[in-house]
Image: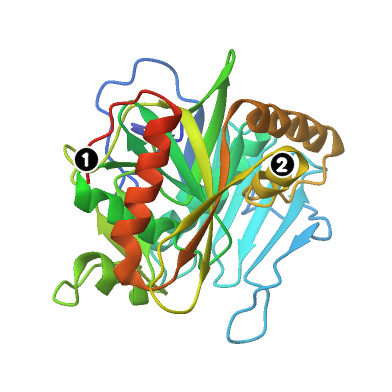
């Protein structure tokens, strides 16, 4: 009988045929797994000669050879979705979203494959299971969560990492899963890392620190979070969503702009994650859920200077606003 290793991510209990790098192992799971992850399994649907449809999603981003970095298609008459990366790493997800098969070519490693698994792959799994993920980071302020969303390069992860310097804890990076519980939304924890581009590292930890790379093939680093002082393992109610918009120029204080109605909905909708599924019914339900998010959760646009010296002011502004929204006992900056 195969012994599986258990992890908890984004509210899902995972059982993996091997331990996933950088993800805490759960020694005593309290229930059956939501998702089984099979690594280089001999029974994988990826190994059989089965018909694959034309891809319904092809990324605009390309590798150095001009090939799309990712394409997504259907396998087995729609019984599985296949995600294939240009480096040859592949994933097959069954439509119940309770099984994922993974393989990768040499000289790639499990560490390379896991960097995709804990990001885009689990993002797609969440959507298949009816949970809407935001492309965002989340920080705990008191007993509530705030989500930091925004376009690529807006500083979501950089801001989350900066919060840890002032006694706050990161709940999740890259993916913020929105779980609806009665009349509120809850954010479950991810894993104890924040991923940073090299140009952000100096502003967060200083140039005297060398951070490990996410994997050998990706020019991006990760900041390990202390599981006791910098990482929040609790699922916390969502207090607000801050949509970051960074701009170049002199160091000026950040400005918050409340969003409401259609503008707030567009602000949240444009920051959803892995929204490639060609399922109109699922998209309709997601749209309705996001409408409830906008009705119940304050949305703010944050105009912030890209100058890393202004990170303390940005953290203080967001923490102060979140503290005013609900009595959450914020720590002082």
Applied colour scheme: rainbow
Q: Earlier in the sequence, mark 1 or mark 2?
A: 2
Report the front residue among 94 and 324: 324
Name the spot of residue 195 as percent of width and height, x first.
Answer: 37, 60
- Rendered-image quadrant of the N terminus: top left
Total labels: the figure holds 2
- The location of residue 4, given as percent across then percent down, is 36, 33
Q: Which residue is mark 1?
A: 332
Of 269 and 260, the residue lying toward us: 260
Q: Secondary structure at mark 1?
A: loop
From the viewer's perspective, is residue 303 above or below residue 235? below
Seen in the picture, residue 164 relative to 227 is either above or below; the reply is below
For this orientation, the residue located farthest to the top is 182
**Badge 1: how crowded within 10 Å, few (<14), some, or many (20+)?**
few
Asked whether the viewer can see residue 287, the reply is yes
Q: Position of residue 293 (x, y in %)?
A: 64, 30
- Taking the image as shown, residue 282 lies to the left or right of residue 59, namely right
| Secondary structure category for the residue under label 2 | helix
Image-quadrant location for residue 99:
top right
Furthest-bottom residue in this view: 65
3D distance between C-alphas at marks 1 and 2: 31 Å
**Residue at 34% over, 26% down:** 328
The residue pinned by badge 2 equals: 265
Q: Position of residue 31 (x, y in %)?
A: 41, 15
**Taking the image as drawn, is residue 13 in sight?**
no
The dot on residue 8 is none
Are the two marked residues, 1 and 2, in contact with CB atoms closer than 8 angstroms? no
């Amino acid at each position: 009988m195969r012994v599986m290793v258990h992890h908890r991510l984004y509210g899902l209990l995972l059982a993996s045929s091997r331990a996933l790098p950088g993800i805490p192992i759960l020694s005593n799971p309290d229930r059956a797994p939501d998702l089984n992850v099979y690594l280089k399994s001999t029974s994988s649907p990826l190994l059989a000669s089965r018909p694959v449809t034309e891809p319904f999603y092809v990324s605009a981003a390309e590798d150095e050879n001009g090939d799309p970095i990712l394409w997504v298609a259907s396998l087995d008459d729609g019984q599985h979705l296949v995600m294939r990366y240009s480096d040859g790493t592949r994933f097959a997800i069954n439509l119940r979203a309770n099984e994922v098969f993974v393989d990768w070519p040499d000289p790639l490693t499990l560490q390379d494959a896991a960097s995709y698994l804990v990001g885009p792959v689990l993002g797609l799994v969440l959507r298949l299971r009816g949970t809407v993920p935001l492309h965002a980071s989340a920080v705990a302020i008191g007993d509530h969560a705030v989500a930091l969303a925004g376009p690529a390069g807006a500083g979501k992860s950089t801001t989350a990492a900066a919060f840890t310097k002032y006694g706050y804890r990161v709940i999740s990076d890259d993916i913020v899963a929105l779980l609806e519980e009665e009349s509120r939304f809850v954010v479950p924890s991810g894993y104890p890392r924040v991923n940073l581009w090299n140009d952000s590292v100096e502003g967060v930890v200083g140039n005297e620190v060398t951070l490990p790379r996410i994997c050998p093939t990706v020019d991006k680093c990760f900041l390990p979070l202390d599981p006791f002082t910098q990482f929040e393992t609790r699922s916390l109610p969502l207090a607000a969503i801050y949509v970051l918009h960074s701009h170049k120029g002199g160091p000026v204080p950040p400005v918050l702009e409340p969003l409401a109605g259609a503008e707030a909905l567009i602000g949240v909708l444009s920051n959803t994650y892995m929204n490639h599924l060609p399922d109109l019914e699922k998209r309709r339900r997601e749209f309705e859920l996001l409408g409830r998010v906008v009705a119940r959760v304050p949305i703010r646009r944050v105009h912030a200077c890209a100058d890393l010296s202004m990170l303390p002011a940005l953290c203080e502004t967001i923490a102060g606003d979140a503290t005013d929204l609900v009595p959450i006992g914020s720590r002082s900056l």
